[in-house]
Amino acid sequence: MTTATHHTTPRRAAHSRQRAVGELAAGLVPLLVVAGVTASRFALPAMYLLRTVVVYALMATLILRHVPPSGTGLGPANWVTLGRATLVLSMAALVPQPEVLVDAGYWWIIGVMTVAMALDGVDGQIARRTGTATAFGARFDMELDSFLMLVLAARGWRSGRGGPWVVLLGLPRYLFVAAGWVWPWMRAPLPERVRRKAGCVIQGIALLVCLGPIVPPGLAAPVAALILVLLGASFAVDSVWLFRLSRS
């Protein structure tokens, strides 16, 4: 019995990885569709498409390193997250492109990112209904949300509607993780809080609003600054809670 289990587990892990490879390869289709339409709409160079594929390949590599050895591959819930990722990565590859710094470009980014944000939560519902919720899926969803915010913040900076400090709006999650490397007590799991989820939604909406061409530049910067203060306060509350937990 022990020997059979010992051989079955690596086999299932290999099968799961193979299925994930196929699913990630299929994810190239929506990625190239969105990137292709974007490139055509704004007459972008081939380098944009190459950059999009490279970023996707990096994400796929990370996924394959952490995919659960369950033998089921990514699963239906993570297919939705992967679909969201194709939208986010297509827009991430746009950050260095000055061609989209026009009203039509901003509306395109806002539209695509709004769809990506609207689909957030659908993957979780599917996971619960199909009984396929995993720590991997939750982490995939969380990291994608963090990257989405970073992309929007970087685009906000590139738009000229705020200084380089606007990028800080996309960094709280990464700064929190970095702090955990310095202070191990900050790696402890946090309890679910409506405040944290609401803050994430407000953060995304505010970044989208700041990109809107109808929003005066003089208003975009104060809105971004206010959201940054609120995010800082939220993370400070979590940090204090973790510190007290470590001392209890």
Image (cartoon, rainbow, N blue to C red):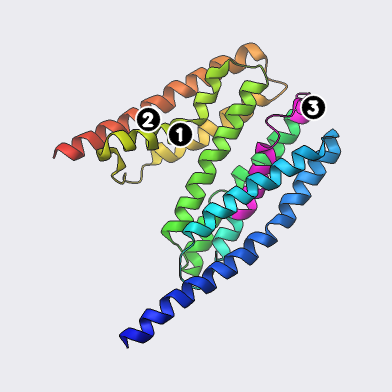
Left or right: 14, with 53 as reference point = left
Residue shown at 49%/61% (left/top)? 67
Does label 2 or label 1 sit earlier along the sequence? 1
Residue 49 within the magenta-colored segment of the rendering: no
For the residues labelled 3 and 1, the Cα–Cα distance comes to 32 Å
* Number of residues whose C-alpha sits closer than 10 Å to that of mark 2, classed few (under 14), some (14–19) or many (20 or more): some
Quadrant of the image for the C terminus?
A: top left
Residues at discs 2 and 3 in contact (Cβ within 8 Å): no
Q: From the image, tell me which residue sits under label 3.
A: 99
Q: Is residue 95 above or below residue 89?
A: above
Most common secondary structure along the magenta stretch: helix
Residue 237 makes an appearance in the image: yes
* Number of residues whose C-alpha sits closer than 10 Å to that of mark 1, classed few (under 14), some (14–19) or many (20 or more): some
Q: From the image, tell me which residue sits under label 2.
A: 234
Viewer-side label of 3, 1: 3
Left or right: 81, with 97 as reference point = left
Residue 91 within the magenta-colored segment of the rendering: yes
Tell me residue 127's x, y (percent): 50, 62
* Residue 95: assigned label: none
Residue shown at 56%/54% (left/top)? 61
Residues at discs 2 and 1 in contact (Cβ within 8 Å): yes
Name the residue type under label 2. Answer: Ser
Check disc 1 and report its element: helix, strand or loop.
helix
Check disc 3 and report its element: helix, strand or loop.
helix
Name the residue type under label 1. Answer: Gly
Q: From the image, tell me which residue sits under label 1.
A: 199
Q: Which segment is the magenta one?
A: 82-105
Name the residue type under label 3. Answer: Glu
Tell me residue 118's x, y (percent): 61, 45
